[in-house]
Image (spheres, grey):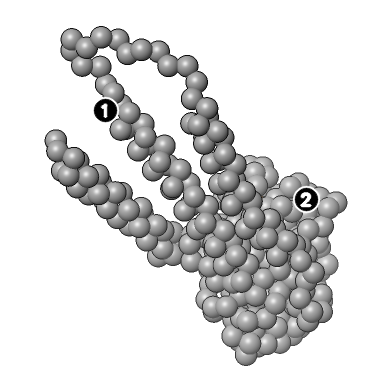
Amino acid sequence: MTQRSKRTALARAAAILSALVVTALAGCSSREFPQTIFEPHSDYARWIQSLNVQLIFWVTVIFVLVQGTLIVAAVRFRARPGQPDPKPVHGNTVLEIAWTLAPAVILALVAVPTIQTIFRTQAVMPKGALKIEVTGHQWWWEFKYPDLGVVTASEMHVPVNKPVVLELQSADVIHSFWFPAVGGKRDVVPGHPNRIFFTADTTGTFPGQCAEFCGMSHANMRMKLMIDTPEAFAAWVAHQKTAAIEPDSTSAAGKGKAIFAGAACIACHTVDGVSAGIIGPNLTHVASRTSIAGSMYPNDAEHLAKWIGDAPGRKPGSLMPAMSGLGITADQIPMIVAYLQSLK
Ligand code: CUA
């Protein structure tokens, strides 16, 4: 191979490699991978994204240099028939200084933006931010808005373009709060409150989940982020603050309420005006949510009934027991479902 054709081959290989990398990254779109980190929707997520891109750049440079040198050395200096053994070489001061200095310089170039990002994300929280107390439970997320008087679960609503501060705490073991669209992750440690702040810049619904192994149903500890317009957020808050709906006592929902109020349900769940349990999610407006069971199932009659009948069978390790074993009969379940569906 002539020198020129070698160079052409090398250029072609580099072009193919770049095309592959770009295609692979473009493939990480939110359509196929809703939990992608490559489509940031908040200031925090953009800082992380920028850091990520810089790191990918440097590791790509290192990869190409190291692998390129390796391939050139392997091809050019390979053993050929009839050739004598090569002479052993000992030490090369220039080379040794170079391969000590080069990684040090690259590490420094990586350290500067990394430390800058750490300080940025740990800065004093912005004034006037909306405070949300996030509690990780095995295996669902609770969201309290102390200044708005709202408590909900599994689905967190935030207004677009407004700073939000999340105060993270755990009710039991270590969890990790992670909504890839707005940044993270941040560990949720018992007895050690953490916080994270961001300003979301796009409306939409984005998935998130616990990112720290926390027991049997860790993978089922999911959540949804609803980034609303200011008007939609205000409407959501106003609705969540309304009293629980009182069903007609002769309807299925009314009968369901009586069963709910007389059963073990009230030991764990709050429905304003009916019960005050704090172990499970607050159900005052459960029907206004799109999912149940730590955002694992859609919030519809079929899944509610299956969940009430046998929660541990639907979610391994669930702290909610099978209500069928606690005196709730199969014909009572549809009435409880009707009641829960009335809690809009
Ligand atoms: Cu909570 Cu994993």
Q: Which mark is residue 141?
A: none
Residue 189 shows which numbered tag? 2
Horizontal placement of 68 versus 55: left or right?
left
Near-viewer residue (38 or 34): 38
| Callout 2 amino acid | Val
Q: Residues within 10 Å of mark 1 (few under 14, many from 20)?
A: few
Height in image: 132 above or below 168? below
- Three-letter code for the amino acid on which mark 1 is drawn: Arg
The percent coordinates of residue 150 (x first, y second) are 76, 77
For the point 62% across and 49% down, the residue is 108
Q: Please name whichever residue, 179 or 251, is drawn nearer the observer in this view of the structure.
A: 179
The crowd level at tag 2 (other Cα within 10 Å; few <14, some 14-19, many 20+) is some
**Residues at marks 2 and 1 touching, judged by CB atoms closer than 8 Å:** no
Is disc 1 placed on a helix, strand or loop? helix
What residue occupies the far bottom of the structure in this picture?
Answer: 231
Which quadrant is home to the C terminus? bottom right
The residue to which callout 1 is attached is 76
Give the alpha-carbon distance from disc 2 to disc 1, as whole Å: 55 Å
- 149 vs 7: above or below: below
Question: Residue at point 62% right, 90% down?
Answer: 231
Q: Would you say residue 164 is visible in this rendering?
A: yes
- Nearer to me, 18 or 70: 70
